[in-house]
Image (tube, grey):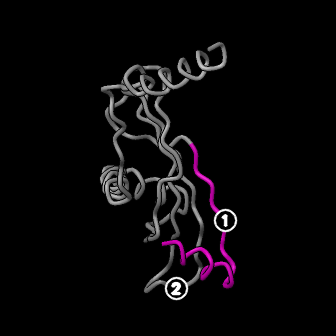
Amino acid sequence: MKKILPLVTLAVSIAFLPLFSYSHVQAKTVTEDEIQLRDDVILDLLFLSTYKALEEHFGKPKQYYCEQILKIEKKIEPSHFIVTVQLITFEGAHDFPFDLVTLTFSNKNSIEWRTIDIKSRTLKPNEITNITKAC
C-alpha cells in the first residue's frame, strides 16, 4: 500500500496537470510575409528621409536598392523609435561604384524622421555578388 500511494498521487498529478497549466492566452505566429510587409511599409515611410540623407552624405542624389531593416528600437519616450536601415547605392544603370550604406533614423521630438547616423563604404567587385544574393 505504501508503494502504491505515491504512484497514484503521481498519476493523478499528471492527469490534472493540463487543467492547471492551460492558459487562454494564445501565442500569435507571425509569418515571413507579414514581417516583409511591415518592413516594406517602414521603408516606404522612410523613403524621403533616406533620399535626403544620401544626397547630403554623397553631395548628389544617389539611387539605391537592396534596402533592408537591420534593427528597430522602441525607446522609453512615447512614440519614439530608432530604425537602422542598410542599402546599396549605385551609379547609372546599376554601375560602379557601389556603396554599402547604413543609416540610422530617429523620430524623437518630431513627426519627421531624422538621420542620426550614416556610415558608408565602397564595395569591392567580389563583395557585390555576395551581398546582393541576400536581396
Q: The magenta stretch spans which residues?
A: 117-135
Would you call the spot at circle 1 few (<14 residues within 10 Å), some (14-19), or many (20 or more)?
few
* Residue extending farthest front: 1
Residue 94 % position (x, y): 47, 83
| Mark earlier in primary sequence (1, 2) | 2
Examine the structure image and report whether residue 121 is included in the region drawn in magenta. yes
At label 2, which amino acid type do we have? Answer: Asp
Examine the structure image and report whether residue 107 is included in the region drawn in magenta. no
Alpha-carbon span between mark 1 and mark 2: 16 Å
Vertical placement of 135 versus 84: above or below?
A: below
Residue 103 % position (x, y): 53, 51
**Which numbered tag is attached to residue 95?**
2
Q: Nearer the viewer, residue 115 or 33?
A: 33
Looking at the rendering, which quadrant does residue 16 occupy? top left
SS label for mark 2:
strand
SS label for mark 1:
strand
Q: Nearer the viewer, residue 101 or 56?
A: 101
Q: Is residue 87 left or right of residue 130?
A: left
Vertical placement of 127 versus 103: above or below?
A: below
**Which numbered tag is attached to residue 121?**
1
